């Protein structure tokens, strides 16, 4: 019988794994820890691997050689982001990498809508007042969504869904992406513009790009300096896309009006963990103190539909490659 090991499995993922295992007559063993050089040994004797984590597998590429020695020829990531994997090292060791590129665009887009509405209606600031028994509304009057310009950096599956939602609610939508979808413009859903125009015109800038070397600190002081002082930033893509130090400065200096972050730099040190009064990430502690910032612990993907699709698609891809077939979700190393 084919055997697959699933790394870093949460309790809510297990029922979907069990269901898939029975339907496909494949043994799947779940373990709660991440896949690293000190845990790869548990993959010995298995035919394939699925995993999901936010920290890199290793830093020197040795884990891929180990997997090759075990006779494992694939790695299936239960998420869209594959920045935890060294694609070059995987390719050199004959390991095919897959991801789940479209588990549920609506899951992320709906969180963006929630964040946008909380920012627009000044919910963080009102909560501070309420917590202090202050029920005065002066100074926090809102504008309606139909008055807003939404700027989307990265118009892929998620960005497209975000555009459709805000367009249907009456907002004007601008988008920027290396690959354009003319049908969105023809339908009047958005207009494609350069990033600088998004920064200058948008009332809400929302990021939906993959993390690669080009996108690290894509949104930094240069971007904030061009944004309106009344504008908001939303980042539900990857933490390093936004320069946290520059964001804190922009918020403190009132260069922008507020931010909602589901992802942050150094989040692997804090998310899914518990602490006392402070986290070990100083900049995150600063963000928590700001009255115009909304923080969530990387939950954009976390819906029933999305979790089921992530688990089952990763398992489908693993089995496909184990059987010597090709998956449409394979990701190749493209060089520097």
Image (spheres, rainbow, N blue to C red):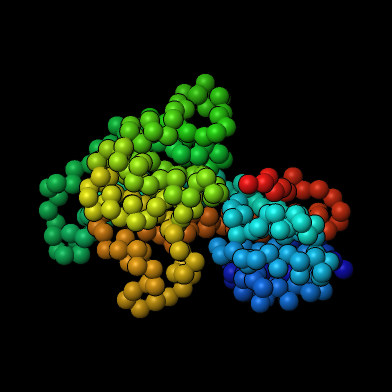
Q: Based on the displayed image, in which of its 4 quarters is residue 167 positioned?
A: top left
Q: Is residue 66 above or below residue 245?
A: below
Position in image of residue 229 (x %, y %): 24, 41
- Asked whether residue 10 is in view, the answer is yes
Q: Is residue 245 above or below residue 218?
A: below
Residue furthest out toward the top: 186
Position in image of residue 139 (x %, y %): 14, 46
Question: Considering the image in quadrants, where does the N terminus appear?
Answer: bottom right
Taking depth in this image into account, of 171 and 61 the one nearest to the observer is: 61
| Residue depicted at x 53% and y 55% | 301
Position in image of residue 318 (x %, y %): 76, 58
Is 120 displayed left or right of 85 in the figure?
A: left
Q: Is residue 150 above or below residue 182?
A: below
Taking depth in this image into account, of 164 and 276 the one nearest to the observer is: 276
Image mark count: 0
Taking depth in this image into account, of 165 and 163 the one nearest to the observer is: 163
- Asked whether residue 121 is in view, the answer is no
Taking depth in this image into account, of 271 and 187 the one nearest to the observer is: 271
Position in image of residue 131 (x %, y %): 20, 64
Is 245 displayed left or right of 304 in the figure?
A: left
| Residue depicted at x 50% and y 24% | 185
| Residue depicted at x 65% and y 66% | 60
């Amino acid at each position: 019988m084919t055997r697959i090991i699933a790394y870093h499995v949460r309790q809510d993922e297990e029922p979907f794994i069990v269901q898939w295992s029975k339907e496909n007559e494949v043994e799947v063993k779940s373990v709660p820890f991440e896949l690293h050089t000190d845990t790869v040994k548990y993959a010995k004797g298995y035919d394939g691997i699925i995993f999901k984590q936010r920290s890199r597998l290793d830093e020197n590429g040795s884990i891929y050689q180990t997997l090759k020695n075990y006779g494992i020829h694939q790695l299936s990531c239960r998420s869209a982001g594959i920045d935890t994997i060294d694609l070059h090292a995987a390719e050199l060791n004959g390991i095919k990498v897959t991801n789940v590129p479209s588990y549920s665009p609506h899951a992320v887009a709906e969180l963006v809508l929630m964040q946008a509405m909380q920012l627009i209606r000044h919910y963080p600031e009102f909560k501070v007042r309420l917590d202090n028994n202050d029920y005065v509304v002066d100074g926090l009057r809102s504008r309606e969504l139909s008055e807003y310009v939404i700027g989307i950096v990265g118009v892929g599956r998620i960005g497209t869904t975000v555009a459709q939602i805000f367009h249907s609610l009456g907002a004007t939508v601008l988008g920027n992406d290396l690959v354009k979808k003319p049908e969105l413009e023809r339908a009047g859903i958005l207009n494609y513009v350069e990033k600088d125009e998004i920064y200058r015109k948008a009332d809400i800038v929302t990021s939906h790009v993959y993390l690669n070397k080009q996108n690290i600190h894509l949104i930094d002081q240069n971007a904030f300096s061009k944004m309106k002082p009344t504008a908001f930033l939303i980042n539900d893509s990857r933490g390093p896309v936004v320069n946290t130090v520059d964001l804190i400065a922009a918020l403190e200096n009132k260069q922008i009006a507020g931010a909602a972050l589901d992802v942050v730099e150094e989040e692997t040190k804090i998310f899914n963990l518990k602490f006392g009064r402070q986290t070990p990430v100083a900049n995150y502690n600063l963000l928590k103190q700001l009255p115009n910032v909304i923080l969530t612990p990387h939950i954009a993907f976390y819906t029933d539909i999305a979790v089921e699709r992530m688990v089952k698609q990763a398992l489908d891809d693993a089995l496909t490659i184990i059987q010597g077939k090709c998956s449409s979700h394979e990701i190749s190393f493209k060089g520097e």
